[in-house]
């Protein structure tokens, strides 16, 4: 899916949580605004929001089931790119500039990838 940023967004976390698959993660609480996202802490002390799909459990000590980075993008609007992943109100996107990170879905307009042959899929 293609995206265009329709509303500016500033990253709230300059030093985001991230981990590899199999990492120890402590799940502290679920986000009331975006259910399915959990505030987590890793042994290095970094904290941040992690979607449940990256975690083996949703409370207390658990492990990650795949690598993850909570890197958010700062955008002004008008940027274009593609959706990498869409999860409960947030989209991981790769902008045409090469930057990759998370943005709220409410700040994006999505369209289907056009069929190169010009025929309907």
Image (spheres, helix red, strand yellow):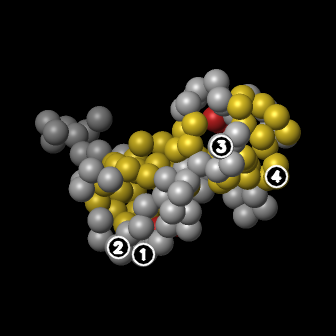
Marks 1 and 3 sit apart, C-alpha to C-alpha, by 31 Å
Q: Quadrant of residue 21?
A: top right
Marks 4 and 2 sit apart, C-alpha to C-alpha, by 31 Å
> Depth-wise, is mark 2 or mark 3 nearer the camera?
3
> Depth-wise, is mark 3 or mark 4 nearer the camera?
3
Which of the two labelled residues, at mark 2 and mark 1, occupies the earlier sequence position? 1
Tell me the element at label 4. strand
Tell me the element at label 2. loop
Above or below, 102 relative to 78? above
Marks 2 and 3 sit apart, C-alpha to C-alpha, by 34 Å
**Between 32 and 117, the one nearer to me in the picture:** 32
Which of the two labelled residues, at mark 4 and mark 1, occupies the earlier sequence position? 1
Q: Residues within 10 Å of mark 3 (few under 14, many from 20)?
A: few
The extreme right residue here reads 60
In the picture, the disc for residue 44 is: 3
Split into 4 quadrants, where in the image is the C terminus? top left
In the picture, the disc for residue 77 is: 2
x then y, percent, for residue 8: 42, 75
């Amino acid at each position: 899916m293609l995206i265009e940023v329709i509303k500016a967004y500033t990253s709230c976390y300059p030093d985001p949580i991230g981990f590899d698959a199999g990492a120890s993660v402590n799940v502290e609480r679920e986000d009331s605004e975006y259910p399915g996202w959990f505030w987590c802490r890793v042994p290095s002390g970094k904290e941040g929001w992690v979607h449940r799909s990256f975690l083996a459990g949703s409370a207390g000590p658990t492990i990650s089931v795949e690598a993850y980075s909570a890197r958010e993008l700062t955008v002004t609007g008008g940027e274009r790119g593609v959706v990498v992943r869409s999860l409960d109100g947030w989209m991981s996107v790769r902008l045409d500039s090469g930057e990759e990170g998370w943005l709220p879905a409410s700040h994006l307009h999505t369209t289907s990838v056009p069929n190169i042959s010009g025929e309907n899929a």
